């Protein structure tokens, strides 16, 4: 079976046919580096993270390019307000972005180019468009003449008239058509500039992606993606620029993730219902955030609310509780390398068959336009089966049970890993969860750990009075200590 994906250009679900067998090139538009990332950025990042991971899982060699816009009106405004250079502002927010993405377990793209590294390429491309009569210069600005490009509107499926009527286009005396867009802008006082054949200026926004995608992926590449708000005008303009210059199609498949809503309303700064990635990760484990997003199909909107995240947290706790139970049982496993499927009971054979079929079911779901909700449903099924098995077994574990649980763990972690889930040791997951809960209640986790260490020293010195004092003090904060062979752990009452 092959991967099928919904192509916004053709408005159909299509079988993926790579340009080069065994390889896939993907370009996704990245952030404009002037502010910290919010949940909307996180969703797009998670969606394309699992799409690229899944291509890798299916044996493709993936080249994934995601750019940074590091010159733009919003960056210039911020730089001028703060008395900084645009590169200082961009640098700061690219660093913040990278930290957020790492925290969310997003794999790094193959390349993460910045617009300002490709100014010469942009000047070349604009010159070609001018030569071809697809662009015109007015007083140091260069505009794209949309009427001269026949395919304008083909991605969003709209005619020029519809677009003019529906778009909030800035009316400028210099433009011949209100939909014409700036390829190059003459720089004003206080703005950064580069030398060009049209005088000192800076690029418009859209041109960078045409240049960087061609630089890294060639004139035609496999998949172009982004949030659905990029279809018009950004990607429509990229098509006009690239295809206008090369005469070849820019990308074969156009893939978009849906919006993030907050309690059924559109998320926006002005409504105040705005969450940054750092905000959510204070309250939820990254696996919980990923599960929340992947429980909806990537094209659907997701509704961000405390209830939906609490649900995702319960689901993730169940996954990790099963992995933890498997881990605990398996610490008592001896050598089970002599066991094969034939040596299992009928019940165990059936369980193994069903676990192995999880891999096929998972692939079926993901091949079908990356249907993560269905894929996650299969993982829940597998967890239910394993829990039933563990509840019915009398442990100390037999070699057969160890064999079965080993298969269960490997398969669950393998398919989960494709979704970027279960990468954590289960004990670490629950410890982080506890620390997060403690912080929410205003407890200082470092102080708790420090007191536990002090109690250990007191006990070693047989100072039972001090040891008891510490235990009582922590109990007063609803912290329960558990002494075990591996040391003392704690939990919240
Ligand atoms: Zn772009």
Image (cartoon, helix red, strand yellow):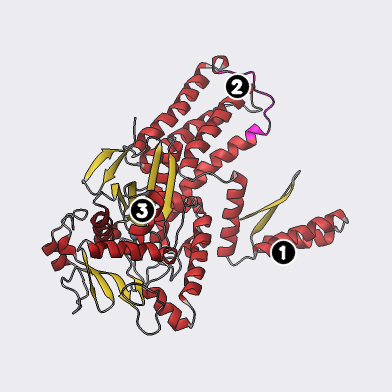
The residue lying toward the viewer, choosing from 440 and 86, is 86
Please give the name of the residue rendered at 41% of the width and 29% of the height, measured from the top-left corner. 360
Q: Which residues are magenta?
A: 329-340
Left or right: where does residue 195 sit relative to residue 329?
Answer: left
Give the mark nearest the N terminus, 1 or 2: 2
Identify the secondary structure beneath mark 3. helix
The image quadrant where one finds ligand 1 is bottom left
In magenta segment, residue 333: yes
Q: Position of residue 368 (x, y in %)?
A: 32, 37
Rounded to the nearest angstrom, the CA distance separating label 1 from label 2 is 47 Å
Tell me which corner region of the image, top left, top right, bottom left or bottom right, holds residue 390.
Answer: top right
Residue 75 in the image: state x and y as whole percent.
Answer: 41, 74
Q: Quadrant of residue 432?
A: bottom right
Measured from the top left, where is residue 413 in percent x and y?
52, 38
**Few, some or many C-alpha atoms within 10 Å of disc 2 (few <14, some 14-19, many ≥20)?**
many
Q: Residues within 10 Å of mark 1 (few under 14, many from 20)?
A: few
Extreme-top residue of the structure: 342
Q: Are marks 1 and 2 in contact (CB under 8 Å)?
A: no
Tell me: is circle 2 under 8 Å from ligand 1: no
Residue of label 2? 400
Residue under label 3, please give it: 214
Residue 221 at what x, y percent from top left? 34, 47
Assess mark 1: CB under 8 A from ligand 1?
A: no
Report how far apart the C-alphas of labels 2 and 3 lie in the structure: 55 Å
Q: Which mark is residue 337?
A: none
Q: How many marks?
A: 3
The answer to which of 140 and 146 lies nearer the viewer is 140
Residue at horizontal 44 percent and vertical 70 percent from the top: 35
Q: Is residue 306 visible?
A: no
Q: Mark 2 or 3 closer to N-term?
A: 3
Image disc number at residue 473: 1
């Amino acid at each position: 079976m092959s991967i099928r994906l919904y192509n916004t250009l053709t408005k159909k679900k299509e079988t993926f046919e790579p340009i080069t067998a065994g390889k896939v090139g993907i370009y996704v538009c990245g952030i404009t580096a002037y502010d910290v990332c919010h949940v909307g950025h996180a969703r797009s990042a998670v969606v394309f993270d699992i799409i690229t991971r899944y291509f890798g899982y299916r044996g493709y060699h993936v080249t994934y390019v995601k750019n940074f816009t590091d010159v733009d009106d919003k960056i210039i405004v911020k730089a001028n307000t703060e008395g900084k250079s645009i590169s200082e502002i961009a640098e700061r927010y690219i660093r913040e972005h990278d930290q957020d993405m790492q925290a969310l377990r997003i794999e790094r793209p193959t390349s993460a180019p910045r617009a300002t590294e490709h100014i010469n390429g942009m000047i070349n491309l604009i010159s070609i468009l001018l030569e071809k009569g697809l662009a015109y210069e007015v007083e140091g600005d260069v505009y794209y003449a949309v009427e001269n490009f026949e395919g304008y509107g083909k991605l969003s499926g709209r005619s020029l008239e519809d677009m003019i009527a529906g778009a909030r286009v800035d009316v400028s005396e210099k433009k011949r058509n209100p939909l014409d867009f700036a390829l190059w802008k003459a720089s004003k006082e206080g703005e950064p500039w580069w030398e060009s054949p049209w005088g000192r200026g800076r690029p418009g926004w859209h041109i960078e992606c045409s240049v960087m995608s061609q630089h890294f992926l060639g004139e035609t590449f496999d998949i172009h993606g982004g949030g659905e708000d990029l279809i018009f005008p950004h990607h429509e303009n990229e098509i006009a620029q690239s295809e206008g210059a090369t005469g070849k199609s820019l990308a074969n498949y156009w893939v978009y993730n849906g919006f993030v809503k907050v309690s059924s309303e559109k998320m926006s700064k002005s409504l105040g219902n705005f969450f940054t990635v750092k905000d959510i990760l204070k309250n939820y484990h990254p696996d919980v955030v990923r599960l929340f997003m992947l429980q909806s199909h990537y094209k659907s909107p997701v509704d961000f609310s405390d209830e939906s995240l609490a649900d995702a947290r319960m689901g993730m706790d169940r996954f990790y509780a099963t992995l933890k139970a498997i881990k605990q049982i398996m610490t008592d496993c001896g050598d089970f390398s002599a066991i094969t499927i034939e040596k299992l009971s009928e019940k165990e054979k059936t369980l193994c068959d069903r676990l192995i079929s999880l891999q096929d079911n998972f692939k079926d779901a993901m091949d079908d336009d990356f249907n993560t909700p269905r894929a996650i449903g299969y993982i829940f099924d597998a967890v239910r089966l394993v829990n039933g098995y563990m509840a019915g077994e009398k442990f100390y574990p037999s070699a057969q049970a160890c064999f079965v649980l080993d298969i269960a763990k490997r398969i669950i972690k393998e398919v989960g890993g494709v979704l970027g889930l279960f990468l954590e040791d289960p004990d670490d997951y629950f410890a982080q969860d506890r620390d997060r809960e403690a912080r929410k209640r205003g407890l200082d986790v470092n102080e708790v750990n420090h007191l536990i260490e002090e109690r250990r020293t007191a006990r070693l010195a047989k100072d039972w009075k001090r040891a008891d004092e510490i235990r009582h003090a922590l109990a007063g904060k609803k912290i329960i200590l558990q002494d075990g062979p591996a040391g003392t752990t704690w939990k919240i009452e």
